[in-house]
Amino acid sequence: MTGVLVVIPTYDEAESIRSIVDRVLAVDIRAEVLVVDDGSPDGTGDIAEELAAHDRRVHVLHRTEKNGLGAAYLAGFAWALERDYEVVVEMDADGSHHPEDLPRMVQLLDGADGERQDLVLGSRWVPGGSVENWPLRRLLLSRGGNLYTRMALGIDVLDATGGYRVFRASALRRIDLRSVASQGYCFQVDLLWRALQRGLRVAETPITFTERVHGDSKMSGSIVRESLLRVTFWGARRRLRELGELIVRRRRLPSVRARYHRAAAG
């Protein structure tokens, strides 16, 4: 498969960006890299430019301010779609996601049994998946958030909040990216929920997620609250829609029975 672009958002990732880009370029999938830098004050953008100057497979998209993970990914997706890449990858810059998993994840788009997938999720919570060096609080937050998401939205995806993903470009085009305003965990749930609602085929594959060694986590209380509120809203809207459909079906049932009785009497 050709035309793979790995989108890596950055903000103050100067200590890790060289290593992660080198590891991506070393895997055997002929991938290119787009670093989307939100004006990092630590010089991450300058390092990315240096890497791009020495390797044509590296590209840099500079944004003037820190507008959040979701906005950075959306900018990267738009850049990729404008240039007709076939496959677009989400990956963190801090080494939490292992580039060495990429060949397997990209290959799964064509399906182990020949069934094409539109989206492949690197999952921490399917059998074989794991996390390394996480404190108990983060572990409980992720497990609890995914359980709540499954219950609220009625989906069977075990890791709906993970950020290591491989999309077909055609799948991104079918999702209404222009109306996505979510951030953090919620951004990942938002894209997955839109994909499932549009009938896209989604597969999960196990990965090992390693807690960052350099820099600080971008997770915050506001991101967690946003996720809880938005998922609750989407879940309530789904329940109301299902209830409305049930009421319509029940209202139609008496008329169907009446027609049956009239036909039987005749």
Image: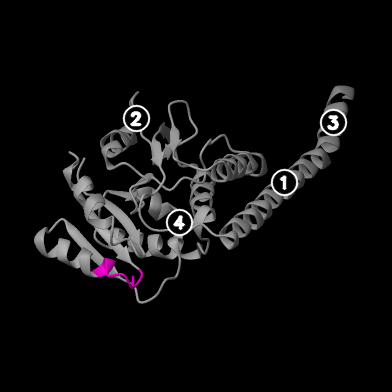
Q: Select label 2 or label 3 by which is in front.
A: 2
Q: Position of residue 78 (x, y in %)?
A: 34, 63
Taking the spot 17% from the left edge, 43% from the top edge, the residue there is 26
Stretch in magenta: 38-45
At label 1, counting other C-alpha atoms closer than 10 Å, the crowd grade (few under 14, some 14-19, many 20 or more) is some
Q: Position of residue 250 (x, y in %)?
A: 81, 38
Label 3 to label 1: alpha-carbon separation: 27 Å
Q: Secondary structure at mark 3?
A: helix
The one nearer the camera, 265 or 170, is 170
Label 1 to label 2: alpha-carbon separation: 32 Å
For label 2, the residue is 111
Query: Which picture quadrant has residue 48?
Result: bottom left
For label 3, the residue is 257
Q: Select label 1 or label 4 by which is in front.
A: 4
Label 2 to label 4: alpha-carbon separation: 33 Å
Q: Position of residue 156 (x, y in %)?
A: 57, 34
Name the amino acid, label 3: Arg
Q: Magenta span has 41?
A: yes
Name the amino acid, label 2: Gly
Q: Earlier in the sequence, mark 3 or mark 4?
A: 4
